Image (cartoon, grey):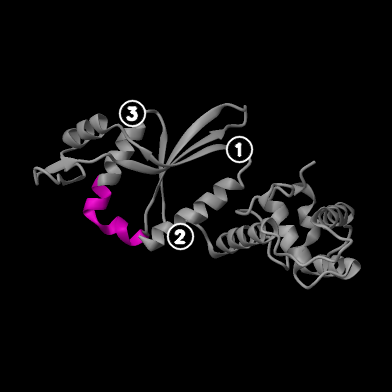
Amino acid sequence: MQLASHTEHRILRFLDLAKNVVEIREQFPLKRSLTLAIAEKLKIKHPSQTDYNTKKPIAIYMTTDFLVTLLNENGQEYHLAVSVKPTSELRDDRVLAKQKIEYAYWSLQGIRFSIITDQSFNSEVSDNLELIHQSYCTVEQNKLSLPGSVNVDVIEHHILSTIKSASENETISEMCKKINAYHGCSPGVTLTIFYRMIAVRKIDINMVKLSIGAQTDVLSLKKYLVS
């Protein structure tokens, strides 16, 4: 399940950046009495394991990979149940049967159930998520090399003011190189801080709609600044 695990990490990173996500619960347990009833109704064999003492099969508790609490446009909470599966596993009849149990379970709760696979994210979004995650970790773990008189807040302020005043075409890469030179920072420092600003939602970008690669036009970022 290495592939599924990798996809789960990407989903977590994506959800962490979503401003309407209130809570993310992983491996959410389902009521066994209900999954058993659903399995019986659908004539599907319920997941089980061999009891250590009796050596007989015993029904196990099923889980859903993520139960996400979100806010709608009116500020009301709603839930989304998410199952993560490699695309290859969805060709397996047994896997599909268990997904049917999960789907029926959440339908009875009035909650939407979605399956996300390793192909649900395009490469551009995946690259963005990885850049943001790595940059966040680098800054939070104090792995940046900054001149003595400069700190992360100073660079962030310079980035924000540059984006706000942008009036001509300039890429993120060009902007960051200029800020680096101005403050005497090592190559890559400003770009790392820029991506970390997205992680902490100081720049609130919809990555499905906009690339945040180094060659992205700075002018396109203006509307994504958090006031």
Camera-side mark, 3 or 2: 2
Distance of label 3 from label 1 (alpha carbons): 24 Å
Q: In the orientation shown, which residue stands out farthest toward the bottom?
A: 187
The boundaries of the magenta stretch are 87-97
- Does residue 51 appear left or right of residue 8 in this picture? left
Q: In terms of secondary structure, what is the magenta stretch mainly?
A: helix
- Bin the neighbour count of mark 1 within 10 Å (Cα to Cα): few under 14, some 14-19, many 20 and up: some
- Does residue 128 appear left or right of residue 117 in this picture? right
Task: Please give the label number shown on residue 6.
Answer: 2
Distance of label 2 from label 1 (alpha carbons): 23 Å
**What's the amino acid at mark 3?**
Leu
Q: Nearer the viewer, residue 122 or 51?
A: 51
Q: Residue at x 31, y 56 (%)?
A: 90
The answer to whether residue 185 is magenta is no
Q: Residue at x 46, y 37 (%)?
A: 80
Which element carries disc 3, helix, strand or loop? Answer: helix
Query: Would you identify the image quadrant in which residue 48 lies?
Result: top left
**What's the amino acid at mark 1?**
Asn
Task: Please give the label number shown on residue 20.
Answer: 1
Instruction: Tell me whether the residue at label 2 lies in contact with that at label 1, contact meaning CB atoms closer than 8 angstroms.
Output: no
- Bin the neighbour count of mark 3 within 10 Å (Cα to Cα): few under 14, some 14-19, many 20 and up: few
Q: First in sequence: mark 3 or mark 1?
A: 1
